[in-house]
Image: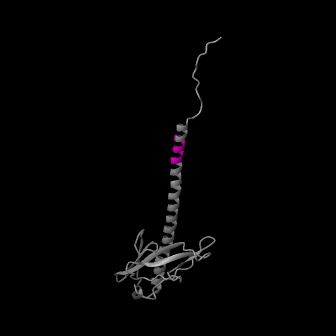
Amino acid sequence: MKGNSCTARTLEGFSLVETALALLIIAVGLLGVISLFVVGLDLNNKSIRDTHRALFAEYVMNGFRALAEVTDWDKVKEGNPDFKLTPPTYYTGSGGGMWADQQDKAMQVVPGDTAGAGIQLTFRPLEDPDIEEMTYRYEVRIQDISDNRKSILLTTWDGYSKIKRDVTTTYMELYRRE
């Protein structure tokens, strides 16, 4: 009869500590990936807001440039009630929308001092005008540089607050053609 020799048998598999550590490492990795999704969504929203503000600025600047061509040069100034723009309804893809002021009327861009508070405007989709997709404040200033040159400065910033944060400024010069 063979002797009873005790041989250590190796157990295959993972211990509870090893499994817990592996789950911890996977959880930390997944949290990092999920946080990237949140940051990506935030940057996407900021990109959309910046694009809409840029389109608004382009419309305002080109509109004032065209309006200055057909307006008497001396009337191209702040405080002139006839020197204003009414943005059109914008169509984007299947929907579209319109810019509206605080009273939900079609907005008019009027140059002038707003005492730093800006004028609030809201973009509402045409398919559901109760939704406020974006809200900005803006201020347009016109200054004489010389007899034949004027500058237009458009400042836009986010939100309902009168505090200027995330400010975008667009500058353009107008020249009188003789």
Question: Looking at this view, is 42 or 65 the one in front?
Answer: 42
- Give how far across and how far down residue 30 sits, in percent: 54, 49
Q: Residue sitting at 53 percent across and 41 percent down?
A: 20
In the depicted structure, whether residue 13 falls above or below residue 100: above
- Give how far across and how far down residue 155 sits, in percent: 42, 74
Q: Residue sitting at 52 percent across and 41 percent down?
A: 21
The residue segment tinted magenta is 21-28
Numbered-mark total: 0
- Give how far across and how far down residue 67 sits, in percent: 47, 83
In the rendered image, which quarter contains the N terminus? top right
Question: Looking at this view, is 11 or 114 the one in front?
Answer: 11
In the rendered image, which quarter contains the C terminus? bottom left
Question: Looking at this view, is 27 or 122 the one in front?
Answer: 27
Q: Quadrant of residue 115?
A: bottom left
Q: Is residue 23 magenta?
A: yes
Dominant SS of magenta comes to: helix
Q: Is residue 122 magenta?
A: no
In the depicted structure, whether residue 136 falls above or below residue 84: above
Task: Specify whether residue 84 is in view.
Answer: yes
Q: Residue sitting at 52 percent across and 66 percent down?
A: 48
Q: How is the image coloured?
A: one colour
Question: Looking at this view, is 101 or 112 the one in front?
Answer: 101
* Residue found at the very far left of the displayed protein: 146
* Residue found at the very far top of the displayed protein: 1
